[in-house]
Image (spheres, rainbow, N blue to C red):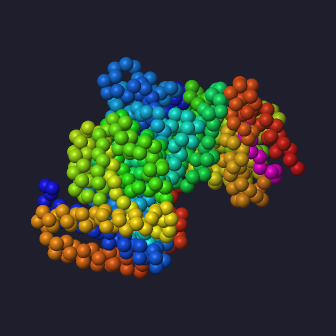
């Protein structure tokens, strides 16, 4: 077992899969050195966040393909390549950019299997950066995974730590449907134990990070780390929380959440997406429909407010749900009568 | 005109099959038997046929909402394609795609596409097999004059040019983007020249003339297979009917419609050329006409008598079975 960062885990997953299967390739903006030239002999930068570092040196320009700034062409080419037998990993540098290329994702890649009568698979991974917290402002900080999860045909994963990032990416690359792999930019430097060998974390399987009896807390992406920092304070207040990281939003491990709520009777969801039609509201809706009789309190979703992500550090800090809000919401649920 | 007799017969068969098929669809649509919109390819038969005759099953095409002609020219299964237009369970797409989304991956037909211009990046993606796997293949995108204004098409041309991918951008300039004339919608008025701006060679030719299309396609395909990158072929042709069946075409004059059918019939032009040159007997072609008529009639009858999908199929094949 070795300690690796979230970023290193992602790179390692790609390298292992590219070694295993020659059909796997990576395409995106600046992913080599931002040079893309066959005869380039400088040090390949591996993208602005260093998430493809080392790939170009190992696999060359044929499989690590720099593109113009053309998200529609990248997503469309990746969709077409997947439909015709390759296994592309397409990088959408920031998920905010989906607005200029979503047709190729939701009208094309997501629908191929269904609308072409299961003639072929679309084994496509779209790696993309989500999340607020490092001052990138309104157009580089969003978490649009609720929109992705709304689309039939797409799978969506949100790794919260290095171990899951590697295992989920390997599973996503091996999966035969389009997967949106949401990398949280605030987690790139996070350390964790990551085995050197290849392993899969299955899509659609959540993980109980801590068992508890009073309240089920489902946290997505960056929110997993935030809620883990609340555990001690909650215990001091006599609240035993069960913490669930769903890891995949689509498919979603609804049974794990139902089982937990049946035990605790209370549900709090921490979700970084916009509140209206958020993924968190979908979770609470399903819980209300399926295990209503187990509930001892109304379900609660904590999200940012319904506004764009601000640039100013104090506003951005106020934007994200914080420890105090989580503790106070948990107390309210525990004390509800 | 250096083509063998077999290839000439093949060319005529592809074009005539499209004509007979589309005329039959027109009749069926008028009778109300077709469950959705259809967009007919009549008048443009020489384009799909001239391009696809230079491609093999491993080569791919990405098509448009006006895709019946591309399917047939790429040798898609006639019966299953017809069933798909009638949305039947045994259609190529099991009835879930319909006319605007027919695909036949077994012959490299990557799908008709109801999003105008969206097929161009998909064709570029299929061409990546040459770069990634070293495969010998060519990928063609059919793009209307209307689609030529889409950003997706521009991005696709630039990416194909930058990566030197084996792509044919086939512009079918039929004069209309849905109801709007090319003189109005196309800035600069020259689609081929736009492609040249991305650094690829381009052709501008009479898309009613099979031989003009085929000769350009042969050159462009050879260039692509050698790894020399994409080409653009702008084919002028006439769309005989409306944007979709039922379109009253208030934007066109009667005179225009009469003239185009007289002067721009790809089948008449082809027959004149090959018969005058003594390459094929008229009677050989007449036999093909009869045979195609019965093939198409049978396919339509079979489709109409085959079942719609089971309602249980509504939610199948959204994801790989067992994975969701």
- Could you tell whether B16 is left or right of A312 in the image? left
Q: Position of residue B314 (x, y in %)?
A: 53, 66
Residue closest to the far top: A42
The magenta stretch spans residue A301: yes
Q: Is residue B133 in view from this perspective?
A: no
- Tell me which residue sits at (15%, 67%) in the image: B275
Q: Is residue A71 in view from this perspective?
A: yes
Nearer the observer, A58 or B34: B34
Q: Is residue A255 above or below residue B240?
A: above
Q: Would you identify the image quadrant in which residue A95 lies? A: top right
Q: Position of residue B175 (x, y in %)?
A: 41, 55
Nearer the observer, B247 or B52: B247
- Could you tell whether A304 is left or right of A186 in the image? right
Q: Is residue B136 above or below residue A65?
A: below
Region of the chain picked out in magenta, as a range: A296-304
Tell me the quarter of the image containing the N terminus of chain B: bottom left
Nearer the observer, B25 or B159: B25
**Prevailing secondary structure of the magenta residues:** loop
Q: Position of residue A225 (x, y in %)?
A: 66, 33
- Tell me which residue sits at (77%, 59%) in the image: A293
- Tell me which residue sits at (41%, 60%) in the image: B66
Q: Position of residue A63 (x, y in %)?
A: 36, 35
Residue closest to the far front: B255
Q: Is residue A39 above or below residue B249?
A: above
- Tell me which residue sits at (69%, 42%) in the image: A274
């Amino acid at each position: 077992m070795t300690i690796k960062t979230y970023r290193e885990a992602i790179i390692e997953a790609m390298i292992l899969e590219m070694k295993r299967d020659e059909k796997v390739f990576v395409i995106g903006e600046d992913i080599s050195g931002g040079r893309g030239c066959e005869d380039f002999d400088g040090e390949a930068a591996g993208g602005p966040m260093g998430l493809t570092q080392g790939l170009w040196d190992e696999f060359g320009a044929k499989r690590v393909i720099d593109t113009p700034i053309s998200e529609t062409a990248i997503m469309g080419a990746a969709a077409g390549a997947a439909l015709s037998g390759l296994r592309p990993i397409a990088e959408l540098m920031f998920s905010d950019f989906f607005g200029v290329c979503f047709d190729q994702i939701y009208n094309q890649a997501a629908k191929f299997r269904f609308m072409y009568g299961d003639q072929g698979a679309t084994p496509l991974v779209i790696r993309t950066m989500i999340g607020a917290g490092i001052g990138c402002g309104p157009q580089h900080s969003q978490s649009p995974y609720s929109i992705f999860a709304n689309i039939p045909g797409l799978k969506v994963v949100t790794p919260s730590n290095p171990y899951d990032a590697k295992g989920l990416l390997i599973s996503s690359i091996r999966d035969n449907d389009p997967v949106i792999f949401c990398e949280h930019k605030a987690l790139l430097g996070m350390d964790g134990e990551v085995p050197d060998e290849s392993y899969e974390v299955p899509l659609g399987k959540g993980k109980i990070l801590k068992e508890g009896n009073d309240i089920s807390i489902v946290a997505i992406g960056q929110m997993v780390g935030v809620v883990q920092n609340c555990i001690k304070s909650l215990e001091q207040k006599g609240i035993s929380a069960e913490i669930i990281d769903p890891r995949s939003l689509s498919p979603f491990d609804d049974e794990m959440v139902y089982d937990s709520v049946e035990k605790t009777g209370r549900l709090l969801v921490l979700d970084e997406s916009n509140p209206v039609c958020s993924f968190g509201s979908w979770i609470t809706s399903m819980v209300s429909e399926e295990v209503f009789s187990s509930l001892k309190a109304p379900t609660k979703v904590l999200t940012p407010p319904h506004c764009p992500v601000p640039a100013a550090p104090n506003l951005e800090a106020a934007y994200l749900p914080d420890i105090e809000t989580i503790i106070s919401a948990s107390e309210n649920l525990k004390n509800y009568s | 005109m250096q083509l063998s007799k077999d290839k000439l017969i093949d060319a005529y068969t592809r074009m005539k099959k499209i004509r007979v098929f589309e005329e039959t669809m027109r009749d069926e649509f008028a009778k109300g038997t077709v469950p959705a919109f259809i967009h007919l390819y009549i008048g443009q038969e020489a384009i799909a046929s001239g391009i696809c005759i230079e491609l093999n099953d491993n080569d791919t095409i990405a098509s448009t909402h006006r895709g019946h002609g591309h399917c047939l020219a790429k040798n898609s299964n006639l019966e299953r394609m017809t069933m798909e237009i009638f949305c039947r369970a045994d259609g190529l797409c099991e009835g879930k795609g319909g006319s605007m989304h027919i695909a036949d991956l077994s012959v490299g037909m990557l799908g008709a596409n109801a999003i105008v211009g969206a097929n161009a990046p998909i064709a570029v993606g299929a061409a990546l097999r040459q770069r990634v796997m070293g495969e010998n293949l060519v990928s063609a995108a059919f793009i209307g004059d209307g689609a030529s204004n889409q950003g997706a098409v521009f991005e696709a041309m630039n990416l194909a040019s930058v990566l030197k991918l084996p792509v044919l951008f086939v512009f079918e300039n039929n004069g209309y983007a849905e109801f709007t004339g090319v003189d109005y919608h196309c800035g600069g008025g020259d689609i081929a020249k736009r492609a040249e701006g991305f650094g690829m060679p381009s052709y501008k030719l009479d898309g009613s003339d099979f031989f003009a299309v085929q000769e350009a396609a042969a050159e462009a395909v050879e260039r692509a297979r050698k790894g020399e990158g994409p080409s653009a072929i702008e084919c002028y042709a006439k769309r005989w009917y409306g944007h979709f069946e039922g379109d009253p075409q208030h934007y066109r004059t009667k005179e225009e419609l009469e003239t185009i059918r007289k002067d721009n019939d790809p089948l008449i032009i082809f027959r004149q050329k090959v018969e005058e040159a003594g390459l094929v007997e008229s009677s050989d072609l007449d036999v093909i006409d009869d045979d195609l008529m019965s093939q198409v009639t049978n396919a339509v009858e079979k489709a109409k008598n085959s079942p719609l999908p089971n309602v249980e199929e509504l939610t199948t094949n959204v994801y790989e079975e067992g994975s969701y």
